[in-house]
Amino acid sequence: MIIQSVSQLIGNTPLIELPIDVPNNSHIYAKLEMFNPGGSIKDRLGQYLIQDGIDKGKINDQTTIIEPTAGNTGIGVALAAQQHHLPTILVVPEKFSYEKQTLMRALGAKIVNTPSEGGIKEAIKKAREIESETPNSYVPMQFENPANPATYYHTLAPELIADLGDQGIDAFVAGAGSGGTFAGIAKYLKEQNPKTKSIVVEPEGSILNGGPAHSHRTEGIGVEFIPPFFQEVTIDETLTISDADAFEQVRQMAATQGLFIGSSSGAALAASLKVAKELPANSTIVTVFPDSSERYMSEHIYEKEA
Ligand code: PMP
């Protein structure tokens, strides 16, 4: 295969049927989003957000792109902005991984760090502040832009249906940070088959199940406010997965399957295994593995206590 640009490598990622013991003889399929060129599911979003801004006349060839991000969206946005030669400023709470921040810089983006304690809310505020000081700038704002769930509605979700053919999907399980992945895919799958259950996954310390907000080791998922995209989609269940359970799956996948998954993928797998216990025998469960463990080595992802 000869390609002209890495942007041609975004999407159409493999779907693995995990060869592991699943309760009730059910089957878990996971979309391997680490195979996108920037290493995560958010390459799709970066490409879509920049194209959407161009199509709507909000971005011209001189526009500075500004975005608050936990990291992977920053890499996706920087990758897409680079293709269009647009300067990029990413606002990142400093706790997010060294590897992700290094990759953003390598792509040519400027990083502005906000204090970890302020969470994503403070990064959002700072991004708006920089926008007001920067002439001809555009903030795609993944946390409220309908282009975010639309990305997944139009790309990843149809890929799942195409890959699984006639095989119905009994449950869709995915983590939520901005909520775009979950909302876009759940909406599409329910339109195809209203019986498909949609289950959202969060770490302990996220607020969806009503628990108090606190920090967690699982990176990329967990919310400080209810994603606005959730208003448009039915959520059948919210599963809260501990860091210990997520990281156990991360270690298991490397040790037994040769799969280097990040901690949000570990949480998605732990949740999928719980869902298999609740569903009838021989069910088909589909989930998403958003990125790889390799961008969390500095956070000692394979060590039990870090
Ligand atoms: N996992 C990882 C590793 C991520 O970076 C993100 C995005 N923050 C997610 C899951 C969640 O995706 P979304 O923002 O679409 O909810």
Image (spheres, helix red, strand yellow):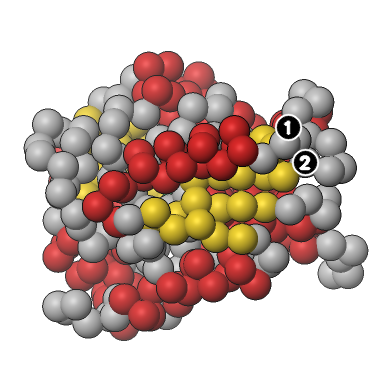
Please state the horizontal and vertical placement of residue 262, each as a whole percent of the image.
38, 66
Image quadrant holding the N terminus, namely bottom right
Identify the residue at horizontal 43%, vertical 37% (top origin).
125
What label does residue 53 carry, if any?
1
Mark 1: amino acid: Gly
**Does the image show residue 33?**
no
Contact, mark 2 vs mark 1 (Cβ under 8 Å): yes
What label does residue 248 carry, if any?
none
Q: Residues within 10 Å of mark 1 (few under 14, many from 20)?
A: some
Please state the horizontal and vertical placement of residue 80, each as a whole percent of the image.
72, 52
Taking the image as shown, residue 40 lies to the left or right of residue 155, namely: left
The secondary element bearing badge 2 is classed as: loop
Identify the residue at horizontal 42%, vertical 17% (top origin).
232
Identify the residue at horizontal 32%, vertical 56% (top origin).
115
Identify the residue at horizontal 23%, vertical 68% (top origin).
247
Q: Distance between the residues labelled 2 and 1?
A: 10 Å
Image quadrant holding the C terminus, namely bottom left
Above or below, comparing residue 75 to residue 154 in the picture: below
Above or below, comparing residue 267 to residue 45 in the picture: below
The secondary element bearing badge 1 is classed as: helix
Find residue 305 and report its image quarter: bottom left
Mark 2: amino acid: Thr
Q: Which of 35 and 212 is in front in this view?
A: 212
Taking the image as shown, residue 78 lies to the left or right of residue 249, namely: right
Judging by the rendered image, the residue that carries numbered circle 2 is 63
Q: Nearer the viewer, residue 265 or 116?
A: 116
**Mark 2 / mark 1, whichever is N-terminal:** 1
**Does the image show residue 106?**
yes
